[in-house]
Amino acid sequence: MSTDLQPAVAGLEPLIGNWTLEASIAPPGVHGTCSFEPALSGAFVVQRMEAPDPAPNGLCVLAPNGDGDGYTQHYFDSRGVVRVYAMTFENGVWTLERTEADFTPLSFAQRYRGTFAGEGKAIEGAWESRQEGADWELDFELTYRRG
């Protein structure tokens, strides 16, 4: 797949395109959708997510870190939630992590770890959360399927 991504975000090319979302907290057969596309002359990647109620719809801007090490996901959703996640994307593994307060207080920490599978046609992963002083716990599994 050829995209018009600038070098600082070229490593995100495997995400570009349309995906179906499958979450372990959704009823069987109920799916969301997600797309990733270059934005602002390929300097950023925009992620759009739509999910059936009660899950929120979301918009994210994926930006390269200024030091060239990793990325930042700027997250916004239909509930009015705004968050910033530290992001890495390397060797077929996508990670998102929020362990510090940003635009909203940090009442719990969150992280996602997804691994590419099926020759890049799926990202299989899970969101975890952690209360202060506790261990990480499974929140829900989330799989992206290209389609």
Image (tube, helix red, strand yellow):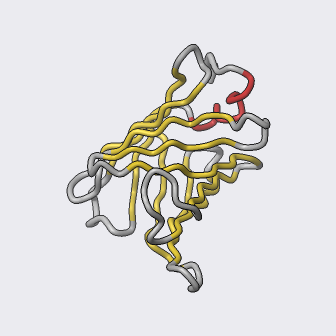
**Image coords of residue 81 (percent x, y):** 35, 51
Residue 115, image x, y percentages: 64, 56
Question: Where does residue 47 sit, x and y in percent of width and height?
Answer: 46, 36
Q: Residue furthest bottom?
A: 134
Comparing 39 with 108, the one in front is: 108
- Place residue 71 in its image quadrant: top right
Where, quadrant-wise, is the N terminus in this rendering?
top right
User: Which is more toward the observer, 125 or 65?
Assistant: 65
At x 23% / y 52%, what residue is drawn? 52
Which quadrant of the view contains residue 7? top right
**Figure quadrant of the C terminus:** top left
- Residue at 55% x, 30% y is 45
- Compared to residue 88, the image places residue 6 above or below, namely above
Q: Residue at x 49, y 41 (%)?
A: 146
| Residue 109 percent location from the top left of the image | 53, 69
Tally of marks? 0
Height in image: 24 above or below 132?
above
* Relative side of 77 to 125, left or right: left
Q: Is residue 140 left or right of residue 3?
A: left
